[in-house]
Image: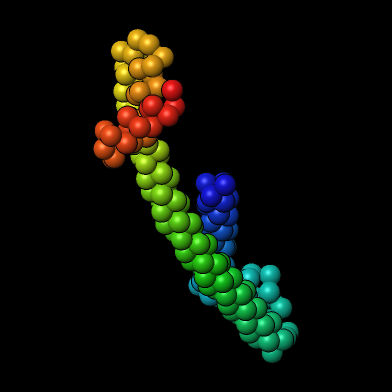
Amino acid sequence: MTERKCATMQKKSDRLEAELEMTRKQLQYARSDALSRRRHGPCSKSTKLSQSFDAGALNCDSSFAKSGEKSVVNDLQEKIASLSKELQKKDAIIESERVAHRAQLKDFITAVKVAERYREETKSELARLIAVCRNVNSPEEVLWFEVMQKFQCCSKRNALLAWAQAR
């Protein structure tokens, strides 16, 4: 589940990076377009003919174009800044998910090791019991073995009394 979430966040992050790159390209294009207009002057060849008739109107148009270019550049810069912030947030989320996933993986590995240790202990105990049962010949010996297992910590006297009562 966490891997899917991490993959989804990674895809979103990649998409945001692509969008950020596209916006940067648009900003670069707008800057180069503005610079080329400044280099070639505020008017094109067709407007130079009409400049003699209405010079004041052309100056207003060029200042309007410059302010329009500035607003486009500012909009693109704001968009880049917001996308960068969003990308940083997504990266932080992805990193926290990775840390959580690593911790969960460590816990899982520890649980598997403990389970394996218990399995080995149970397997050795079962092998010991099977070996003892193979050595037992009669039902009385089986009964004696069970009684001895119950009273392993107690004295043999108590074990003999329990065996006598069980018979």
Q: Image quarter for residue 157?
A: top left
Residue at horizontal 35%, vertical 39%? Answer: 113
Q: Quadrant of the C terminus?
A: top left
Closest to the observer, 145 or 14: 145
Q: Image quarter for residue 115?
A: top left
Note whether 139 is above or below 10 in the view shown. above
Residue at horizontal 40%, vertical 22%? Answer: 143
Report x, y in % for residue 28: 51, 65
The colour mode here is rainbow
Note whether 160 is above or below 104 in the view shown. above
Residue at horizontal 64%, vertical 69%? Answer: 45
Left or right: 38 with respect to 128?
A: right
Report x, y in % for residue 70: 59, 79
Report x, y in % for residue 76: 58, 71
Note whether 68 is above or below 149 in the view shown. below
Left or right: 33 with respect to 121?
A: right
For residue 126, say whether it is visible. Answer: no
Residue with the most extreme top position: 137
Q: Image quarter for residue 135?
A: top left
Note whether 11 is above or below 44 in the view shown. above
Closest to the observer, 100 or 126: 126
Residue at horizontal 72%, vertical 86%? Answer: 57
For residue 79, say whether it is visible. Answer: yes
Report x, y in % for residue 111: 41, 44
Closest to the observer, 147 or 21: 147
Closest to the observer, 61 or 122: 122
